[in-house]
Image: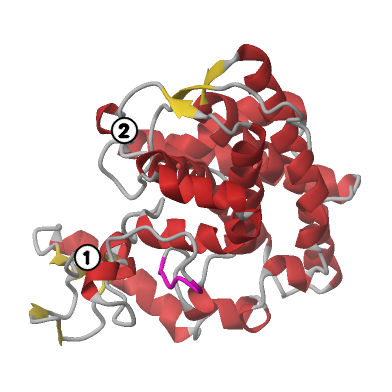
Amino acid sequence: MTTDIRTEPSIDAAFKAAAQSSYAALRALGPIHRARILNGIPCWMVVDYELEGLRPRVSEIAGELADCIAAAGEADLVRSYTGPLPIRVICELLGVREREQGQFSEWTKKTLGSVPAERQEGFSNLNGYLAELIAEKRRAPGDDLLSALVAVRDSRDGRLSEEELVGTASLLVMAGHDTTVNLLGNAMVALFDHPGQARLLRERPELVRGAVEEFLRFDPSVESTPMRFAARDIELGGARIAHGDIVVVSLTSASRSDPALAAAERDILDVSRPAARHLAFGYGIHRCLGAPLAQLEAEIGIGTLLRRFPDLRLLVPTAELSWIPTGMMRGPLSLPVTVTPAKDDRS
């Protein structure tokens, strides 16, 4: 797989000029994460929120969802497991009421869709709801991340503006929902295609944590970055990128182009690969704030399925699966499976 460098010179010049001025204003402030969130420290660390403490509850949710699959004997993993797990976790993390989680999930999906009007509707509804939830947490704080962020905002005025507080919450939702749904879905497709690798993880469950990084390298849930704007003329990989050009970076291609791997190894799934390198979460100070949460959910989510269902079987060939329409996101829309629970499937 070769690195893909694409520019979009056909984008309306007026749009490009307006977008560039907005980005230029942000650049004038310096690296935003450093300027606004304590030199890039993840926000749950800023508010002393212990993410690893979520492990028992994530395991409990995964177990409850697996119970339902076991009782039915067959299920659509996306509808019954890979979809509900991340949304329940992020909603509990932020303190979203259970009765509102379904609507919350729909808004999040729209923000990441390919239809501009639906994206705008999703953002508007999601941010409006989060603003109301923030006001509620201010009146009656709970034991959740959003309440902790509100406390930081109010006790240390200037750390986050009210707009940034809503934006941070919105970012956590998007980083902690559909991306993780598709990470789980893509990982399971990879294991259905590579039964030997699934068998290895069942035999050596201690490999699951590291295997999450290999799944992210092999088939990431985010295929490409949002549009970027060239701040100056540059030549990269033999392509000339002019000042003002819009550039879209293929994260999938980049993650399979690691020069540390031999060319013959880059397209091979190896769940025992030590320290698989990828750009699925971005890099440096702009690394995804939701990365630790996604890694935790994937480790528990994949591990639970492999442990609870030793004969987990996809009912259709992977070549016949339907996928998310072309856009930033990549993931299966449905994963129909059949299962026979292990004799002691709650172990």
Residue nearer the viewer, 59 or 172:
59
Name the spot of residue 93 as percent of width and height, x first: 75, 48
| Residue 181 seen by the camera | yes
Q: Which residue is mark 2?
A: 318
Residue nearer the viewer, 328 or 263:
263
Q: Which comes before the other along the chain, label 1 or label 2?
A: 1
For the stretch drawn in magenta, the main secondary structure is loop
Question: Residue 26, labelled with which disc?
Answer: none
Give, as a three-letter code, the residue at label 2.
Thr
Q: For the residues marked 1 and 2, what is the alpha-carbon distance in whole angstroms?
A: 40 Å
* Residue 5 relative to residue 172: left or right: left
Q: Residue furthest top?
A: 72
| Residue 176 seen by the camera | no
Q: What residue is at 14 percent from the left and 62 percent from the top?
A: 8
Name the spot of residue 281 as percent of width and height, x first: 48, 65
Circle 1 residues within 10 Å: few <14, some 14–19, many ≥20: some
Residue nearer the viewer, 253 or 119:
253
Label 1 element class: helix
Name the spot of residue 287 as percent of width and height, x first: 51, 71
* Residues rendered magenta in the picture: 274-279
Q: What residue is at 66 percent from the left and 48 percent from the top?
A: 300
Name the spot of residue 89 as percent of width and height, x first: 70, 43
Q: Is residue 116 above or below residue 70?
A: below
Question: Does the magenta-highlighted stretch encompass residue 149?
Answer: no
Give, as a three-letter code, the residue at label 1.
Lys
Q: What residue is at 83 percent from the left and 47 percent from the top?
A: 137
Circle 2 residues within 10 Å: few <14, some 14–19, many ≥20: some
